[in-house]
Amino acid sequence: MRIDTDALKAIYQTVPALASKTFVSIAPHGTALPYAVLHPSDGRDSQERVSGPRVTRHPRFTAHIFGATGEQVQALADLVKPKLVVNGRGIVLSVAGWKNKPVWYEAPVPIQVDWEGPEPVAFHVAEIGWTSDPD
């Protein structure tokens, strides 16, 4: 799972505002906005074809972009998505030892606001994943 996380994190870090502020599951306390947090999951493993590989992986991620305003998180999401989906087709992430299929990207909910802290924080939620066979 770590190699998949590193591959996706590298994409997020190509956005200058997130270059040093993309974290896995927990952002350090006091991190200044904006920043991104990736929540990895192994997904489910399957055997897609009887004659195919024994393990087809389905890595999945829930990704959050946090910002001071809805406009800020929209702008950052608008910079991240085209790095994952180019001309309507998902990119293929390079992960050693695995032959990946194109990435899929979904933003299933509207921008949310967390009102619990001292200042409101807006955040964007994306779900990202792909299918992966042994190389």
Image (cartoon, rainbow, N blue to C red):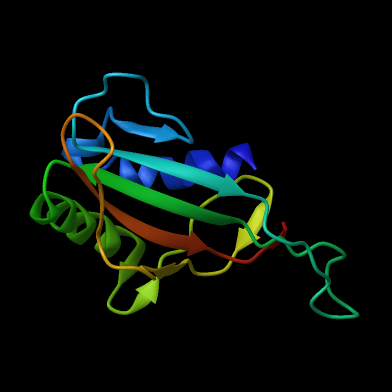
Q: Is residue 84 above or below residue 68?
A: below
Q: Look at 45% across and 30% down and name the residue there.
A: 26
Disc count in the image? 0
Quarter of the picture holding the N terminus? top right
Q: Nearer the viewer, residue 55 or 126?
A: 126
Q: Look at 38% across and 60% down and name the residue there.
A: 126
Q: Look at 49% across and 56% down and name the residue there.
A: 93
- Percent across and percent down for residue 3 are 59, 40
Quarter of the picture holding the C terminus? bottom right
Q: Is residue 57 above or below residue 104?
A: above
Q: Look at 35% across and 61% down and name the residue there.
A: 84
- Percent across and percent down for residue 99 are 64, 60
User: Could you say which quadrant of the image residue 57 lies in?
Assistant: bottom right
Q: Nearer the viewer, residue 12 or 135?
A: 12
Horizontal side, residue 87 vs residue 59: left or right:
left
- Percent across and percent down for residue 131 are 62, 66
User: Could you say which quadrant of the image residue 70 lies in?
Assistant: bottom left
Q: Nearer the viewer, residue 115 or 90?
A: 115
